[in-house]
Image: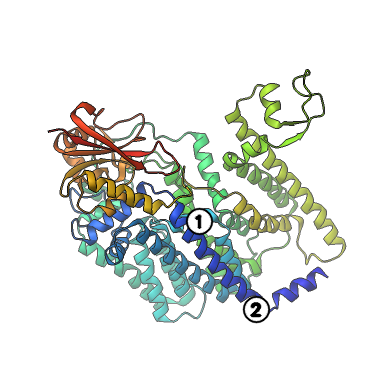
Amino acid sequence: MIEASIRKLRDNAWLAPALTGLGFLLYTIQSGIYTYILTSFVDEGGYLYIGYLYARGILRPFQDYGPPRWYPPLAYLFLGQIEKWFGESLLTGRFFSILCGIGMLIALWLIARRVGGKWWGVAILWSVILTPVAVQIYSLALSQALVACLLAWCLFFVLAEKRRLWQIVTGSVLAGLTIMTRQNLLPLIPLLIAYVFWQHGKKAGWWSLAGCLFPLIVIHVIYWPNILQLWAVWLPARWTPFLNAYRFPVAELLAGNSPTPSAIWLSLLQGFRFHYFSLVGFLVCACLWPRRGEWKSRADQRAAYFLGTLFLVLALLHAWATISTSNQVATCTFCFTPYLSFFDLTALLLVVVTFPSWRRTLSKVAQGIIVLFIVLLSAGLGYAGFDRFGPWLMGIPFPAITRGLDPRHWIPFITLWDILSNKFHQDYWASRVTVSIAAAAILGILLVGLVAVWHKELTKGKRLNGYSFGSLLLVIGLIQGVWLSPLMSGSYHQSGICLANIPANNQKIAQQLTQAIPSGSRILWEANTVVPLLYAPGISIYIPPIYAVFTFRVGGDPQQLAKYGLWNDALASQWRQDAGFIVTESTWYQPYQPGGDIDSTKYNVFQTVPTDPCDPHSYLLVYERKP
């Protein structure tokens, strides 16, 4: 009965197109809402304002005494040109990201339909829609949506068999443009070329090599030699001594940036929480990887090895970049989630390609490992979501089976926190973590038990098509992301969502700044984002603090630091003496203050409206030097 109903729905002529249209509509609506309610932070300001300066010809990529040379020029030039064409504002940049996100979805949907059929097109579309944090990231004026769009269309033109030569060249050129937007996806180039040689032959492979290298060579020629700074930042010095002349000056990062083990685990597990379908899907594919000779086709096998290797290499590299304390930029402990948004679509496509060939039977040892994996994954998700689920779990009321914690008063209901605090004297903040992990682990055990019972019943009825218990458990574990992924949602950065018009709020701040600061004035900007300056083109700032604390260094030669877009206390003190105005923030680097405390007796001071409308204590302070 159930099987017949499923087949009837599957064969329905209009259901898949209807779900596809609904999916695109919901993605657009979600993105449109997030465009207005997501608070802005340092990265958005960096991309938009630097892009604006480049597009207007005020600065040039990789020039000395310009912005830090962290990212390739296209990361800024695309956004800068859009800002120039359609008006400098936060909305312009975010609308561009929405279009890139929709473009990425179209490419994914087309690839999934080509490889797996119309229902896989629906599945891959909804796997993104049901991942709210990914939609948030793709709605911000960052490089994630642009890179994901370029990567998706690169794969659209190259992936699968019977690709024409012009399609392979187009996809390869897009791969080169992807690297010139974010160089952290560099492994894409060799892996893509190897795949083209393997799948499409030598002629196509050589053309793919030329297509990939063309954008890289052209852009390197335009910005030679300072563009070598791009690679000096990331490549180890012992392997690339020829880049030593382009490395950052010797200086320490801001103290206190070393991640703790608990923070590292939380960051990595948040990747599973916020990118459930991608990371869990990859692990399921790895566990059920088809045996030799059981692939649906050779083309699927080659595509699977390419996609799987690409995702694994990029995931490991970005996990290392998240937790490493040895890089030259800054430690970004909780960047694993946004990093995954660049390339997690490759794991989604891997599921589509490998699913028809997944192995159905596993050894008892493998099934035991899978049971342990499901329980540990559940506990890990509990840890990653303790901020969301811990307080809720401890606050659930249930009937008291005694007269209550105080025998003099009858209490009909108590909570778990009542017991933990009064009887066991536990700390509230630590209890959130413990309770969330324990509850999630119990749910994982219950899932294993339910699947075991169901598997036994299905085996009796001979309706299982040969699936062993471990295989069925993995498949159900992936499918449960349909409800689990949106349930675990939140904001991927602190105070990320505020139910207010954030772009309009930044415009209001800019209006207050232009009223207080005469056009052409030189100011020292010591705030966490430069987004308001998009609306105030007459204001000129010192360039290095654009990325706030991330470009600050302790010690070092001031002039050399400024040459590379960095700054330190000495530069901050010098600029404070020269600037007619200082703009700082109420929450600026607490308890650290660059350049020392400001002597407010020498300045006229006023504050703007809150930078975060949901936090009345967040505002800019404008210091005007007294005559």
Most foreground residue, 607 or 568: 607
Cα distance between the residues tagged 2 and 1: 28 Å
Q: Amino acid at mark 1?
A: Ala
**Residue 255 horizontal/vertical position (percent):** 35, 31
Of callouts 2 and 1, the N-terminal one: 2
Q: Is 168 displayed left or right of 465 in the figure?
A: left
Q: Is residue 129 left or right of residue 95?
A: right
Quadrant where the N terminus lies?
Answer: bottom right
For the residue marked with disc 2, what is the amino acid?
Trp
Q: Dot 1 corresponds to which residue?
A: 134
Q: Residue furthest right?
A: 460
Q: Is residue 342 visible?
A: no
Front residue of 36/17: it is 36
Q: Which residue in the protein does label 2 denote?
A: 14
Could you tell me which residue is drawn at 41 percent across and 72 percent down? 171
Q: Of discs 2 and 1, which sits in the foreground?
A: 2
- Indicate left or right for 470 with 111 as reference: right
Residue occupying the point 61% across, 45% down:
381
**Mark 2 Cα shell of 10 Å, populated few (<14), some (14-19), many (≥20):** few
Residue 171 left/right relative to 61: right
In the rendered image, residue 274, in percent from the top left (x then y), is placed at: 55, 51
